[in-house]
Image (cartoon, helix red, strand yellow):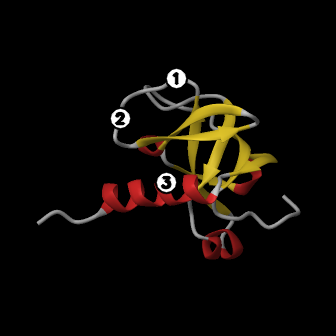
Amino acid sequence: MGNKIKQFEIYWAELDPTIGAEIKKTRPCVVISPDAIQNNLKTVILAPLTHTFRNYPSRTQVFCGNQLAQVGLDQIRCLDKSRLHEKIGKCSSDEAAKISEILVEMFSLEA
């Protein structure tokens, strides 16, 4: 990847090999790791997109290539940057805010 990868950009990413219920194949993924990770490590944290819509609290919708998709925040992965291919879009500020809100809720400590 010659260009700097930025949070909330969408890239084609190779997810295979996978096991069991993990989302498979090469598919669009949203970068959810902060820019400091991409700038300093050879890995990136992503959430895959799917057209299989589920009513899970860990999912939210985004537009990718003029198509509605769901971000599978319950399927977060850390991948080597070599698994990323072309950039295909970027989440809107509203989509990014919703992704962030869900991540904070997912990882907040419960009393």
Task: Check the image and name the residue furthest to the left.
Answer: 111
Q: Is residue 103 left or right of residue 48?
A: left
* Quadrant of image for the C terminus: bottom left
Residue at label 1? 52
Q: Is residue 27 left or right of residue 45?
A: right
* Mark nearer the N terminus (3 vs 2): 2
> x%, y% of residue 32?
56, 58
Q: Is residue 17 visible?
A: no
Residue at label 2? 56
User: Dot 1, how many residues are within 10 Å of its Cα: few (below 14), some (14-19), or many (20+)?
Assistant: few
**Which three-letter amino acid code belongs to the residue tagged 3?**
Ile
**Which residue is pictured at 32% across the width and 58% down the height?**
105
**Which residue is pictured at 48% across the width and 32% down the height?**
22
Q: Is residue 12 left or right of residue 32?
A: right
Q: Is residue 57 above or below residue 35?
A: above
Depth order, front residue of 86/68: 68
Label pair 3/1, CB-CB below 8 angstroms: no
Task: Give the total of numbered labels.
Answer: 3
Depth order, front residue of 96/37: 96
Q: Is residue 102 above or below residue 16?
A: below
**Which three-letter amino acid code belongs to the residue tagged 2?**
Tyr
- The quadrant holding residue 54 is top left
Q: Is residue 91 left or right of residue 95?
A: right
Mark 1, secondary structure of its residue: loop
**Which residue is pictured at 37% across the width and 62% down the height?**
104
Q: CA distance from mark 3 to mark 1?
A: 18 Å
